[in-house]
Amino acid sequence: MSETNLLMKVLFILNPTSGNANNERAVLRMHQLAIEKEFDFKFLYTNGRNDDERIQADLANYKPDRVVAGGGDGTIQLVARNLLGKEALMGIIPMGSANGMATALGIPPNAVDAVDAIVTADHCIPLDLLKFNDKHLCIHLGDIGINALMVKKYEEDSQKGLLGYAKYLLSSIKETPLLRYTIKTPEQTYEKEGYMLSFANAHQYGTGVHISEGEVWDGKFEIVNVPRVALDEVIKAGLTALNVFVDKNMFSDVISCTKAEVSIDQEVDFQIDGEYMGKISSLKVEIVPAAVKLLVP
């Protein structure tokens, strides 16, 4: 990217309710960088009501070259789904609580540093997305069981950040029953049981907990079964940074595939990218390969 590219337009889509303490300084840095690098820019702040329509309007009228999402995984997913089939490059500034996708991609965790790294980046990758039940898109991961119940409790509380998640961790573990599910992929049918089933586009949670060897550009996703949760080990871990999954074998039961159908023996909590989706007893999942052009450091 030329440092004097007066024609470049950057649309910053920011979630004003994201909980990162550096967010105000990051916004200031966006203004400063625009002056330094001489590009045009515009802000769009999400409000949770008609965000898709407003984004599409700005894409059509403003015609940005780059669209930078500032927020957590939910904000990133919002932006990504609106860029399907578009030529604009997408960037990520971690301004949420856990920032799972940004962590998996090696984007600087400090939002101010990420502004410099991403807005001026000249390298991009083809980002895959997941699609659930033919309609819900996912950028990072979705799951059923323990984590989904924790997301539900978190959404109902006013306390944000990692402490908000930790507050409901033990109760979510205790309340989640043993689940039995049938997983059908193009290659094989599996019968499994466990307390949590993750559908991962990336290889780790925002806390840094490693869950698979998959990558966001490999044209596949991973189904990760959690057959056991050692509650005593969780308590010993002290809930530090939510690294509760301390058993190294907890994420060893992994299926890599391009699509799958899952039948569950009971209704169970379901979440996508940190957004609670309700209870389900079946699920269809497929990869959307190379869906978005994503800027990376």
Image (cartoon, grey):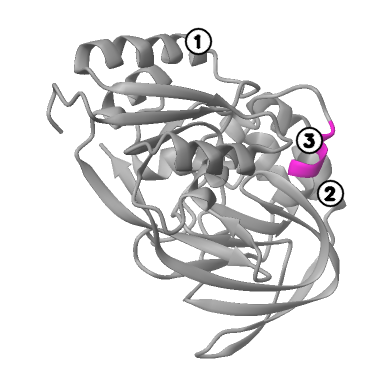
Between circles 1 and 3, the one closer to the viewer is 1
Q: Position of residue 275 (x, y in %)?
A: 70, 45
Quadrant showing the N terminus: top left
Q: Is residue 292 above or below residue 167?
A: below
Q: Which mark is residue 155?
A: 3
Q: Position of residue 218 (x, y in %)?
A: 34, 66
Magenta stretch?
Answer: 151-156
Q: CA distance from mark 2 to mark 1?
A: 38 Å
The overriding secondary structure of the stretch rendered in magenta is helix
**Number of numbered discs visible in the structure rendering:** 3
* Closest to the observer, 289 or 188: 289
Secondary structure beneath dot 1 equals: helix
- Residue bearing mark 2: 174
Q: Which mark is residue 43?
A: none
Secondary structure beneath dot 3 equals: helix
Is-magenta flag for residue 153? yes
Image quadrant of residue 74? top right
The amino acid pointed to by label 1 is Glu
